[in-house]
Amino acid sequence: MKGYLLRRLAYLVPVLVGISLLAFGLGRLAPGDPARDVIARTTGHQPTHREVLAERHRLGLDRGPAVQYLSWVGHAVRGDLGISYTSGEPVARAIGDTLPLTLELAAAAFLLSLLLGVPLGLLAAARSWSWVDHAVRTVALVGASVPGFWVAYLLILAFSVHLHVFPPFGTGGLSHLVLPAVTLALFDIALLARLTRAAVLETLGEDHVRTARAKGLAERRVLVMHALRPALIPLVTWSGMSFGYLLGYSVVVETVFAWPGLGYTAVLAIQARDYPFIQAFALVMAVVFVGLNLAVDLLYPHIDPRTSFSSAQSSADEG
Amino acid sequence: MAASRRFRPVVLILLAATVAVAPSASGARAAAGAQTLVVASTADGYYENPKLPSIGKYPTNANIFETLVRMTPNYAVVPDLATRWQFIPPNTWRFHLRRGVRFQNGARFDANAVKYTMGRLAASGSGAYIGIDKKAAIRSVDPYTVDITPSFPNRRLLEQLVHPENSIVAPGSTPNHPVGTGPFKFVSYRRNREIVVQRWDGYWGPKPRLQRITFKFVPDANARALALESGAVEAAFDIPRESAATVASHRGLRIARSPVGAYEALYFDIRGASGFDLGQDAAIRQAVELGIDRSVIVKDVWRGNASVIQTMIPPSILGPYAGLVQGFAYNPGQAGRILDDDGWKLGGDGIRVKNGRRLSLTLVVGFPNADIHGAMPEAVQAMLRQVGIDLKVVKAPDENTYSSTLSAGQGDLFAEVGNQNDANPCFLPDLLFYFKGTSHGDYGYRFGPGGAFDQVIESKCRTGVSEAAAKQGAAQAMRILVDEQRIVVPVAGVFRIYGLSTKVKGFQPNPSQTNQSWLTVWLAK
């Protein structure tokens, strides 16, 4: 396992180099000039062409792309991610302040989606083609279809404006987490319910489930131990991807709920062409995403003893 | 039934959890004190420049600081930390400072504080625009008199100093603990969350009635409106125009609209290259002007939260000279005749053609963002089609894309919503339309008529000492842009929309949000 882990961590190096090149290149391909934005932000007026040129020089944007990239990488490997154009604060500090908030929100939504999505899917599979199944699938379809910001407004209207149960925005405690986490989780709950239903229905038709039933096991035990457990592999795989999606999609939820996480800050950075922040954001997200998928791979043998790290490795290589 | 029994504990646990995590909002607010105001502000735009951070100053003005002179909601310059001033030719402004003023750290306010602030403005680069840079001379005449000589002849310095970016800061104050002379002193700041201030009992003027103000940064405009409706905040900036009527109809809430302080306007690129060169045709510019029914846009797009104006400058800032700009009225018939006379004949599809070229214009929308313009582009598109002009609408996803498109000249018309945040009547015409010395990427190159316009800017705005001269110059400049050259099509003069609890008293809505004062505000029981 140790060797496998080291190999997977070694893969991270080319991934990060690739991501850094992409983030660097795409940021600069986007139209616009951060120098103009910095002047407008710091002085409160639209800059002249001469002022923009001076600011570009100050920010080092008048150097060649290769020089800029190597300079940034050189500083980054020493832990210096630069100064944010939008806020003037060190990027490393900004990420350190905002990443935990986004992780908190994504984790809460992830937990909600597991707690609700899997049982709903299981229930629908156990009562397949009954009214319960139809109801779950309809709710899942709606949940996966409605836009997140619209759900957010509806939840604020219901639980903040009319019922006064939860605060409409901001951070500060568990109560502040509920509405953004539910909003973020809704899409995931819907997908997980449908995925669980499909996976469990598939295993319910297999021989070992028929055998378990023939042995007279209780239906609940058959469902959970003999149908759900083999179905866990695709669910766990999907969950790793899903957490990445939750981190990405948190942008919308963070903006509506004034949740000052990494996603919201990244949107501001993208709008302002805040290159240091955009590049650091891409790197951090890549590390988180790769780390999550590694954790998922490490889970496989525990869920299904038939898989081993060697087979996990070969499947990873194929993927 | 068995299934429902199985799920009953789960439902009960969820309900209990809901009650457990729900905040006792009313209790928390009651404990915070009766004169505690929570305001939903726009996104956190503070910049942590170590030489001169903008925390507490701009864009959200927490009233920690004051300027030498202040701007009223009617854009008049009145004394603040300076009680009087005089211009000493050729280029020096002498300010006589208010005595008996102390900073919130107990230090005395005097000429040294002004020198210190101007030095920080110069070092940070923020003052370069008004001539406060390393070449500027700041001299103490005596402890309460200071001379400021900008690095270039700047007769508009007085009107520019009202901007909160030019606030007086306490010498030696640290970047992240702002100290000023204002009615409220800094308590705490958390990026993208809130800034908290409390009453400064040593304030030199009338004491504020509010004990504490918390400005919460809520970037989403709809969320600000909902926060106000929920009672989580008592005041909210920039309520969306679509929500204003709903908020006003809500029991316990009201809407306060400022005088015109912002504008929506279209600018013609008069130096566009091939493909975007139709703005060079004066007849087309005039036809567009006459073909747009601005009253419809004000009523249906701005939902009545704006007025039809003849200049893009707030009319109150031009004073008696506002009448110099005649403007225009909706007249599609005349627009059609002008195009006919110019050789643009109606084609089979209703779009005019001249020498085989269709009369097709590109409107670029995106400053400060496309959303704020609402359905204006589509409304203008439909109106211009009636006079035989095809309008392509390009919506830039953000301000940077818009600026890039403008620099590259990839449009015939550019739509903007802008603000007037200082008292300089010439601010907008000088900044956006002065042609001399500009490069291809500049506003002045694309939109500046040059010639007589530049002369007015130079003779009245830049060298005219009196406020009246500047007002007259700005009005003459706008007359050239709107009446004579028809480069600018003012669409709407926009009101600031503040949402307030009816408990909030004494609030005077400022057309410049960043100059909003909270000194007179108090909460009724």
Image (spheres, grey):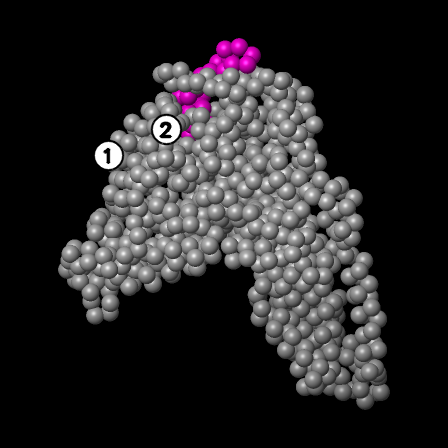
Q: Give whichever of B21, A241 is nearer the camera.
A: B21
> Which SS class for mark 2?
helix
**Label 2 near label 1: C-beta < 8 Å?**
no
Q: Quadrant of residue B324?
A: top left
Looking at the rendered structure, whether the residues under marks 1 and 2 are on a common chain is answered as yes
- Secondary structure category for the residue under label 1: helix
Q: Residue at x 46, y 35 (%)?
A: B75
Amino acid type of disc 2? Ala
The magenta stretch spans which residues?
Answer: B125-151
Q: In the image, is residue B145 part of the stretch drawn in magenta?
A: yes
* Residue A252 location (% of width, % of height): 58, 57
Rendered location of residue B236, percent (x, y): 60, 48
Q: Residue at x 34, y 25 (%)?
A: B464
Please give the residue where the numbered disc 1 appears in the rendered image: B452
- In the rendered structure, the answer to whether residue A154 lies left or right of residue B357 reads right
- Which label was assigned to residue B468? 2
Image point 24% across, 57% down: which residue?
Answer: B335
> Looking at the picture, how far across and down is residue B307, in whole percent?
42, 50
User: For this rendering, which residue is in front, B27 or B132?
Assistant: B27
Q: Chain of mark 2?
A: B
Residue A159 drawn at (x, y percent):
70, 61
Q: Give the residue displayed 72% in from the left and 71% down from the top.
A: A118
Mark found first going from the N terminus, 1 or 2 = 1
Q: Nearer the viewer, mark 1 or mark 2?
A: 2
